[in-house]
Amino acid sequence: MAGPSSLRGRQSFARVDFGQRPGEVPARVCFHMALVTTAAVVLHAFKYSESSKIVRLATEDVGVQSAVAKGAMRPKSKFGARLQVLSGGVAEMYMKPNRDLHTLAAFDVTRQRSELAGDVERYVTATALAELILRLAPAEPNPTVYHYLVAMLDDLVAVDRVNLEPFGLAALWGAVGILGFAPALDGCACDGRRLPDGAAKFSIADGGFLCQTCAATSTSATTLQKQDRQTLEKLVSGNIDDIAPIPPRHAAAHRRLIVRFAECHMNEDLELKALSMWERMWSDT
């Protein structure tokens, strides 16, 4: 649900006596907390104490944020079953500046996406996409990322099963790109030199294709033949309609490529578990 955020600031002041002299104005310490209302998607949720949960939200107005849903585990909680992963709605959060964990006051569901939960391949693809957003998106306003996530989740519900795997590849590459890590496809990732058509070397570490000069000094570049290069270019652009059926061995290579690329540019040592599960799922089918 799109729309401008509503900010209602509330302030409370604590009067503190720091030994002021007679006639001096007492010092005041300000504790500011704003109630923010924004469209959001639940990316992740886990138990936080006996009665509460912590949720990670992709929001339209304040980026990716963490919030504690107090009492969410109780049988008669106001949250009920609303905090399901991939659910979309309107979140109300009490937010404090310079804090990583806020307080979730309410979450009104507008899109449950139960169709994803009922289909393993669709659900795993959706959670892999959510994980990329969770790990790579900054905690600052970026409506473009939020709207991309919502559009891809909705399209994932409707996409034909025959196109589900290439759609997942395209959605994941699109997320990497919209988050600022798009691979260099038209020019060399190192020196920007324009690349000729045909087979080309691709370096995950350098962030894209390499010219012959740079490829000669690379120890990690791998060769993509002309057809695989064209397939990658279409996946990154989101144009899956013109992609010819991808042979199983080549599809496995494309899955490995997006997983390794995301892991390399995440700048963390933690495994992308949902993305790895997505890769293994298609390998087992």
Image (cartoon, rainbow, N blue to C red):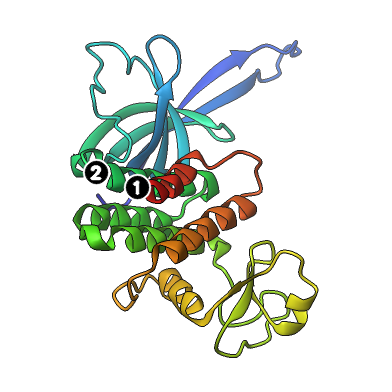
Image location of residue 171, percent across then percent down:
38, 60
Badge 1 is on which residue?
126
Q: How many marks?
A: 2
User: Is 11 situated above or below 42?
Assistant: above
Image location of residue 239, percent across then percent down:
35, 74
Residue at x-position 50% and y-position 64%: 177
Q: Quadrant of residue 105?
A: top left
Q: Amino acid at mark 1?
A: Ala
Image disc number at residue 116: 2
Label 2, label 1: how many angstroms apart (C-alpha)? 8 Å
Mark 1, Cα crowd under 10 Å, few <14 / some 14-19 / many 20+, is many
In the rendered structure, which disc, 2 or 1, sits on the residue that comes first in sequence? 2
Residue at x-position 41% and y-position 60%: 169
Q: Is residue 165 left or right of residue 96?
A: left
Image disc number at residue 157: none
User: At numbered mark 2, what does the secondary structure look like: helix, strand or loop?
Assistant: helix
User: At numbered mark 1, what does the secondary structure look like: helix, strand or loop?
Assistant: helix
Do labels 2 and 1 touch, CB within 8 Å? Answer: yes
Image location of residue 222, percent across then percent down:
64, 69
Q: Is residue 205 left or right of residue 11?
A: right
Q: Amino acid at mark 2?
A: Leu
